[in-house]
Image (spheres, rainbow, N blue to C red):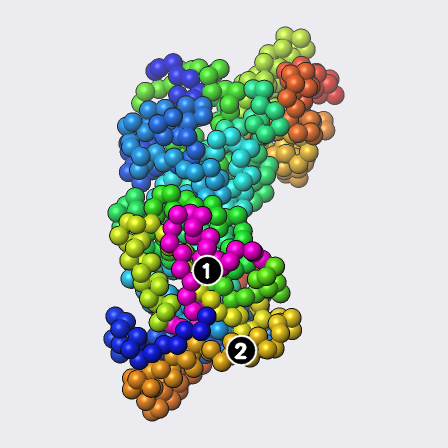
Amino acid sequence: MALTTYIDAINQAMREEMRRDQSVFLLGEDIGAFGGAFKATRGLFEEFGEDRVIDTPLSEAAIVGAATGAALVGMRPVAEMQFADFVSCGFNQLVTNTAKIHYRWRLPVPLVVRLPSGGNIHGGPFHSANPEAWFSNVPGLKIVAAATPYDAKGLLKAAIRDDNPVLFLEYKSLYRRLKEDIPEKEFIVPLGKGTIRRPGKDMVVFTYGPTVSTAVDAAERISKEEGNETCVVDLRSLAPLDHELIIQCVKETGKVLILHEATRTGGVGAEVAAFIAEMAFGYLDAPIVRVASLDTPVPLAPPLEEAFLPTVEKVVAALRQLGRF
Amino acid sequence: MNTTRTRASLVKSDLSNADLLKLLYFMRLTRECDIAIVRLYQQGKIVGGAYTGRGNEATAVGSAFALASNDYLFPMHRDLGAHLVKGQSLRAIFLQQLARQNSLTGGRDGTGHYADPALRIYGNVSHLAAMIPVAVGVALASRLRHEGAVVMNFIGDGGSNVGEFHEGLNMAAVMKLPFVLIVENNQYAYSTPVSKQFTAPCLAARAQGYGIPGVTVDGTDVLAVYEACRTAVDRARKGLGPTLVESVTMRMQGHSAADDAAYVPPTLLEEWKRKDPLEQFERHLIESGILDDGRRSSLGAEIVDAVEKAVEEAVAAPYPEGKEAEDGVFHP
């Protein structure tokens, strides 16, 4: 075991997969000698050279499209968007080409797009995106969100090995803030499966990414203050969702709170809520509750962003109310 | 653009008589297929859209003829001739046009929107220029794996104004990728004439912005197209990077089979009819003794038969079943 930061875990995943499989290569802006805007690719150019760690022009459509083309003929590209926000410039490639190729052509497109996501880093409106809902109803794209260093490494390795396009959400606010002991032996975290971060029988919070720790903190406080035990489920996989785990946890608790840092209306939480209402209505003892960021662009000034984000206080308040319903 | 092909220049090209006859065969086959496609559309047997390349035969055939078998073709919707040159069967083409169960897309898409990896043909999508970055990515893979394979992609005068044209071509240029882009300037993008599409003096002029060669050719002259593309393909294969070939023609029919193109001045069509690529090339082959009347009519008969047979088979083939609709979003 070694104490590893979230960003180093991502770096390790890429390094190990590139050593394991010659067809894996990286492309993106400033990822080569510079090591990437956040240094996620530090050292990889030195080890693998300019043909496997490729600095591209500033052209997200070309990056995503070229990665799609290379994947189409059997390579395994990992494309980095410098900030998740800029994936909008490659949106057409993802939804028109990448997502639709296998359904029409039965050809695998083993592509990963890494998306440094999320706010809470004074990023303002154009450097703080949580873009999953832009893509979660486009059939043909898998989407995963890593909440811990262990998951960041395991999910990224699994994403690289998957023969389908995977959008990999990594969180800027977690890069250097989260550290944990991770095994030195090889491991994978399979796509499509969520996990329980904190057991509890009275309520369940379904969440992912940086709000997993928010939920765990809130659950601890509610346990002390209200005597209720809140289960925290890290969904990990946003497309496809782990439907089985969701139903099982609704069944066991009966009270559901859905939490994400992405804005509220039309977020992935809306899909989870609709799914639960359709498929697990009989197990519910209270209306489903959602806590998320405000329906606004992400503001810059700290008091505005604090009001915008789903803070632990907001989650505690919601859990308190839910527990008493 | 009114180049006259002389006997001398026919002799000058590196093509044998057999090659020249093949070029004619593919152009005539393309035209016959187009005629059949329009007929099928008018009979209601093609759902969705039907697109022809009437007037584009020399561009589609001459360009693809410059490719080797391990090269990749990324054609557009008026490049049926290129599919044929690359080796696609009439059977596959018509099953695909009619969205049948046994088509190369299992009926999930129509027109030329299919992929055939064995022939290295990757069809277009409806978003024009969207395939350019993808084609550039295939060229990148070719370079990274030292395949020596060249990627030939097509775009129109309208599509050349889309952002992905710029991003893709720029990336191909700066990475010196084995990529050739044929810009088919056929005067119209749907109902919009080129005068409303761009102010560049010609589309080949855009190449200067990428530091790559740009050449304009008479798109009705199959040998001129072939020669320009051959130069571009050879250059790409040598590792010297991409070329932009602007092939100037006229879109002789509507944007789609549903478009009567009443907005095109009849005089313009008359002018371009005089430069019909098939008539032009046939005339020169006859004048140079490579084609005689007997061979000309037997060729015509063979082609009509072959197309009829493929059409019959496709019309009789079943659609996919509804229960298949949910399969195949992901690779297992």
Residue reaching furthest bottom? B294
Question: Residue A155: x percent and y percent?
Answer: 43, 30
Mark 1 lies on residue: B183
Q: Is residue B138 left or right of residue A234?
A: left
Q: Nearer the viewer, residue A212 or A41?
A: A41
In this rendering, is residue B203 above or below B266? Answer: above
Can residue B203 be found in the magenta stretch?
Answer: yes
Question: Residue at (34%, 67%) from the top-left corner?
Answer: B226
As drawn, is A325 to the left or to the right of A212? right
Q: Quadrant of residue B48?
A: bottom right
Position in image of residue B271 (x %, y %): 53, 78
| Chain-order first, disc 1 or disc 2 | 1
Q: Nearer the viewer, mark 1 or mark 2?
A: 2
Secondary-structure class at tag 2? helix
Q: Using a 10 Å C-alpha cutoff, classify the residue at mark 1 as few (fewer than 14 neighbours), some (14 to 19) or many (20 or more).
A: many
Residue ID at (43%, 38%): A57
Q: CA distance from mark 1 to mark 2?
A: 21 Å
Q: Tell me if mark 2 has few (under 14), some (14-19) or many (20+) residues whose alpha carbon lies within 10 angstroms of its own.
A: few
Is any atom of residue A199 visible in this view?
Answer: no
Toward the top, the furthest residue is A224
Q: Chain of mark 1?
A: B
Type of the residue with mark 1: Val
Q: Quadrant of the N terminus of chain A?
A: top left
Label for residue B234? none
* Whether residue B296 is visible: yes
The quarter of the picture where residue B214 lies is: bottom left
Label 2 belongs to which residue? Answer: B271
Give, as a single range, the part of the protein colored magenta.
B197-222
Left/right placement of residue A33 relative to residue A149 reads: left
